[in-house]
Amino acid sequence: MKILVTGCSGLLGSKLTPLLARRGYNVIGIYNVHRPSYSADGVKLVKLDITNTVALEDLVLKEKPDVIIHAAAYTDVDGCERDKNRAWRINVEATKSLVRTARVVKSYIIYISTDYIFDGSKGDYIEGDTPCPINYYGLTKLIGEELVRGSDLLHTIVRPSAIYGLGGSKKSFAEYIVEKLMRNECVKALTDQYVSPTYNGLLAKAIAEIVELRPMGVLHVAGPRMNRYEFALKIARALDLPLELVKEASMKEMTHWIACRPRDSSLDTSKAKQLLKTRFYDVDLAVDLFKKEWLSRRGEPCP
Ligand code: NDP
């Protein structure tokens, strides 16, 4: 089976792409700026700016993938607010092209969406709750969802939240916390913003399972609800780092933010838990895996 992964150099793609190759799939990974450094046996890496929709469509028509996993996005929430044109071209126009060509070559498409399609007034969102994005990033991702949902393609829309882990082209919040605390620097973490932190390694496994099961519709694949402060403490505790350096902060102090953030965009994952065997929702497992990965990257023995 041939699988095309967009965003193969990202936080998710850098875990998902080699995992799919290890499972014996024929994988094509698209990156833009950051060529992935993982060993990529069984992966054909293609450098392609997906806003070049002619090149993107040509690639899909030539390769005829059985499955497209669309994980590439302009994920900088403030960046999307600042440069709406760029956000639209990456998050909407490229998705439109993928949908259009997927229909021609009859691919199954997995669209990676986000908890930021919700306004955050309620939390614990289920798949059927009405989206109402409060920033441009969320809006463009929701339009991407609608393009996929409105097509006649066999599709699954996967919504994670606050992805963390190692391996991507940019640092996740967890990595930032660990690096600051290791330098004995304070970390400010929000007590009033709730998310469902999702470990990239388990998210990748869940998506690999979805490739096999092909469930139609939307699935929330995320960790348990917690605020950013609780999450920072969890990471600090797991890596034996000084907890007293984790300081409470609130959203109103974030005066440098350009885009509004949902107050509580946590996701209810009951549906995916019933469907999938992968324990993506298990925070102790996730944090332990993160810790082992962190220690092995530093060349320290795993306990
Ligand atoms: P990252 O920001 O880590 O990576 C983004 C990926 O998209 C990179 O591989 C990047 O390539 C690629 N990309 C961006 N612009 C282009 C372009 N013009 N042409 C080709 N490729 C491009 O994202 P994540 O891995 O964290 O996110 C994966 C998905 O999950 C996204 O769809 C995101 O919306 C969603 N999501 C993310 C969350 C998070 O907390 N990170 C939370 C919820 C959902 P390169 O590095 O080469 O530029």
Image: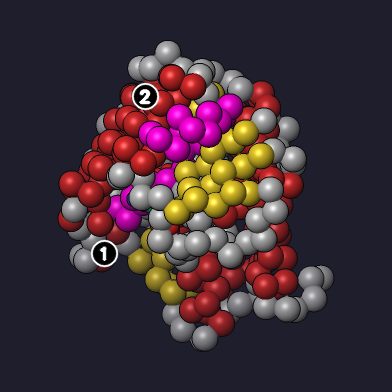
Residue 208's place in the image compared with 170, above or below, is above
Numbered range of the magenta stretch = 57-77
The answer to whether residue 83 is above or below residue 233 is above
Question: At 36% from the left edge and 41% from the top edge, which residue is drawn?
Answer: 55
Question: Which residue: 79% across, 71% down?
Answer: 302
The residue that label 2 is drawn on is: 100
Q: Give me the residue at 55% from left, 31% from top.
A: 65
How far across and how far down the image is residue 281, in percent? 63, 42
Considering depth in this image, is 106 or 11 the residue closer to the camera?
A: 106
> Which image quadrant for residue 250?
bottom left
Tally the numbered discs: 2
Q: Position of residue 154 (x, y in %)?
A: 51, 18
Name the residue furthest bottom.
184
How far apart, in angstroms, are the residues tagged by discs 2 and 1? 40 Å
On screen, residue 256 versus residue 115, left or right, reads: left
Q: Quadrant of the N terminus?
A: top right
- Give the side of residue 217 with respect to residue 37, left or right: left
Q: Is residue 291 above or below residue 107?
A: below
Q: Is residue 64 magenta?
A: yes
Name the side, left or right, on which 244 lies relative to 118.
Answer: right
Query: For residue 254, which numbered disc appears in the image?
Result: 1
Q: In the rendered image, is residue 105 in sight?
A: yes
- Mark earlier in primary sequence (2, 1): 2
Q: Is residue 111 visible?
A: no
Amino acid at pointer 2: Arg
Q: Is residue 114 magenta?
A: no
Instruction: Give neighbour class at mark 2: few <14, some 14-19, many 20+ (Cα, 10 Å).
Output: some
